[in-house]
Image: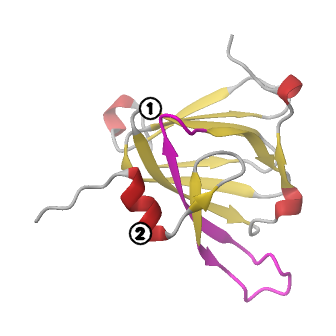
């Protein structure tokens, strides 16, 4: 019997929880060998669907590296607080400019949306994710394209 991936199966497999920025997540790794409680790095599985994208947010002092795993490509937009919006496509189709990995510099605003029904990605954060360093954009600060 062939198995197919769908959002419900992915959420169940990884025991994902709703993410405050949108989408679903499950922490898969945290380097606890460092003195600080947040660790040197952390990683999550992150699921986006056509109806549940990642809202504008930033990690104030951590670099976030996105990794494409399965599903449709992702449009990742980032902005260095007042600068121009930088758009990257995260996905497997290299000839069209998609890349399987994209890094977002520390302190940059970012948002992501699946360009299809769903996308499974991974996000690696260094130093490790700390909720005190996470900030959702306020409505009036939302960055728009148009």
- Residue 98 or 28: which is nearer the viewer? 28
Q: Position of residue 114 (x, y in %)?
A: 48, 37
Structural distance between the alpha carbons of marks 1 and 2: 23 Å
Question: What's the residue at 41%, 69% (across, down)?
Answer: 13
Colour setup of the view:
secondary structure
Q: Where is residue 15 in the image (x, y as percent from the top left)?
A: 51, 69
Question: What's the residue at 83%, 36% (across, down)?
Answer: 137
In the image, residue 29 above or below residue 101: below
Q: Position of 103 compared to 129: left or right?
A: left
- Residue 114 or 22: which is nearer the viewer? 22
Secondary structure, mark 2, is: helix
Q: Position of residue 56 (x, y in %)?
A: 73, 36
Q: Where is residue 59 in the image (x, y as percent from the top left)?
A: 79, 52
Secondary structure, mark 1, is: loop
Q: Position of 95 compared to 112: left or right?
A: left
For mark 1, what is the residue? 115
Q: Which of marks 1 and 2 is nearer the N terminus?
A: 2
In the image, residue 104 above or below residue 138: below
In the image, residue 132 above or below residue 23: below
The magenta segment is 28-53
Report if residue 139 is visible in the image.
yes
Residues packed near mark 1 inside 10 Å, few (<14), some (14 to 19) or many (20 plus): some
Residue 36 on the magenta segment: yes
Question: What's the residue at 74%, 23% (across, down)?
Answer: 84
């Amino acid at each position: 019997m062939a198995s197919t991936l769908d959002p419900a199966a992915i959420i169940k497999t990884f025991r994902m929880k709703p993410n405050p920025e949108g989408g679903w997540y499950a922490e898969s790794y945290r380097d606890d060998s460092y003195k600080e409680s947040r660790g040197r790095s952390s990683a999550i599985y992150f699921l986006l669907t056509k109806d549940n994208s990642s809202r504008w947010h930033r990690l104030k002092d951590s670099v976030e590296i996105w990794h494409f795993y399965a599903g449709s490509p992702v449009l990742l937009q980032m902005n260095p607080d007042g600068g121009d919006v930088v758009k990257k496509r995260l996905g497997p189709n290299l000839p069209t400019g998609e890349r399987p990995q994209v890094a977002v510099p520390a302190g940059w605003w970012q948002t992501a949306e699946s360009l299809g029904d769903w996308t499974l990605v991974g996000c690696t954060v260094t130093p490790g994710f700390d909720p005190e360093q996470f900030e959702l954009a306020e409505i009036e600060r939302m960055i728009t394209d148009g």
